[in-house]
Image (spheres, rainbow, N blue to C red):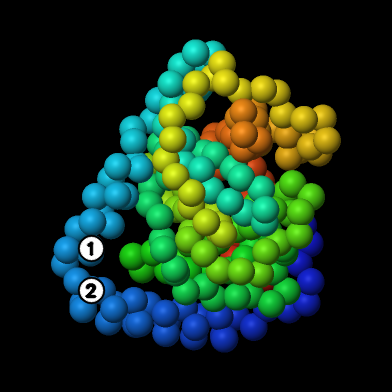
Amino acid sequence: MPKREGNIDWDKARARLEELERATEARDSFTDEAAREALDARARALALPAQVPMLPGSLREVVRFKVAGQTYALESRFILEVLRAPELTLLPGAPPLLRGLTLLRGEVLPVVELAPLFGRPASQGVGPVLVVGTARAELGLRTDEVAEVAELTGTELVPAPPSLEEEAGALVSGVSPDGALVLEGEALLADDRLVFELSEEGVA
């Protein structure tokens, strides 16, 4: 588990989240109805019911996205929605994996960086956030770009390269023909490094 550095100004963080919540409510009240319907339809299309793990020869729909120069793929059944450009509350002193916090319908959602898990420096750019979970939103994955929704079969995958660290390799079910790392949704959601306890004492 990455260690936090420094102290987090929780009063400032709470004030920023409250400000973000007020701005979100104001924005939603003036959002174009057609645009909202289109986004809701997209979210429903991505939020597929839970299925059995990928088997050789089975067909799965995946969402491909890029982070810090690497392409990843995650089964769409784990992606509840895509936030196009959410505002993030940064937490100085938080571990590198925790990019910040955002509000999703009044609930605080931690937004994480995948790159450090795979030995890459975290990108400082902004981009869409994938809301990941099963029955509820559990975390957000910050991306540089959400590329496409594609279909993939288990037989297309090759084993993850030995160069991946052992712990990071556990998150990867295989590699697609074009080099995308196909993530294991269950392993991602169960990874203790991506679970943060937010308290007055800091981030754990």
Taking 36 as reference, is 166 left or right? Answer: right
The structure residue drawn at horizontal position 76% and vertical position 67%, both measured from the top left corner, is 4
Label 1 with label 2: CB-CB less than 8 Å? yes
Residue drawn 67% across the image and 22% down it: 158
Residue at image mark 1: 36
**Up/down of 133 relative to 174, above or below:** below
The image quarter containing residue 162 is top right
- Residue 86 placement (x, y as % from top left): 44, 69
Query: Amino acid under label 1?
Result: Arg
Q: Is residue 62 visible?
A: yes
Tell me if residue 6 comes above or below residue 138 in the rendering.
Answer: below
Give x and y (percent) for residue 169: 73, 34
Query: For mark 2, what is the residue?
Result: 31
Q: Is residue 110 left or right of residue 27?
A: right
Local SS, label 1: helix
Image side of residue 92 versus residue 43, left or right: right
**Residue shown at 48% from the left, 27% from the top:** 152
Query: Tag on residue 120?
Result: none
Nearest to N terminus: mark 1 or mark 2: 2
Question: Residue lying furthest top in this view?
Answer: 57
Kind of residue at disc 2: Thr
